Amino acid sequence: MKILAPLDLASTLSHHTSEMFSRNVAALLGEMLNEGELNIDLDDEVIAGKMLTHEGKIMNQHVLDLLDFEKEEKS
């Protein structure tokens, strides 16, 4: 039996992580673009989940929760 693997696995991880991130960004932009125009569909669960703000309003529930937590700490 032979096990084939990179000798320095740690040095290859950042490359693959970078590739995965760039594919995810490209896929998200592909969902948001329609014939070259930006189309923000807030009914789309994926797009809505990535929106932090829209038209001056905080859209992301996690960010809202964090801001409420910070406000409570200052009180």
Image (cartoon, rainbow, N blue to C red):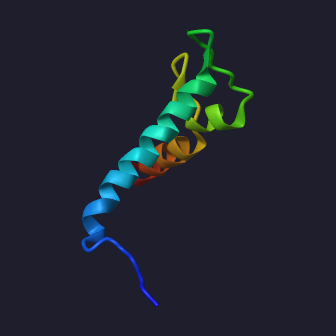
Q: Position of residue 40 (x, y in %)?
A: 62, 19
Q: Quick one: which residue is furthest to the front in this view?
A: 1
Q: Position of residue 31 (x, y in %)?
A: 63, 26
Q: Quick one: which residue is furthest to the bottom in this view?
A: 1
Q: Position of residue 64 (x, y in %)?
A: 54, 41
User: What number of labels is visible?
Assistant: 0
Q: Is residue 51 visible?
A: no
Q: Is residue 4 visible?
A: yes
Residue at 39% of width from left, 53% of height from top? 17
Residue at 56% of width from left, 36% of height from top? 50
Residue at 50% of width from left, 31% of height from top? 26
Residue at 43% of width from left, 39% of height from top? 22
Q: Position of residue 41 (x, y in %)?
A: 68, 22
Would you place residue 30 above or below residue 46 in this image? above
Would you place residue 42 above or below residue 69 in this image? above
Q: Is residue 48 left or right of residue 72?
A: right
Of residues 17 and 3, which is closer to you in this image?
A: 3
Q: Is residue 11 left or right of residue 44?
A: left
Of residues 8 and 49, which is closer to you in this image?
A: 8
Q: Is residue 53 left or right of residue 2?
A: right
Of residues 43 and 58, which is closer to you in this image?
A: 43
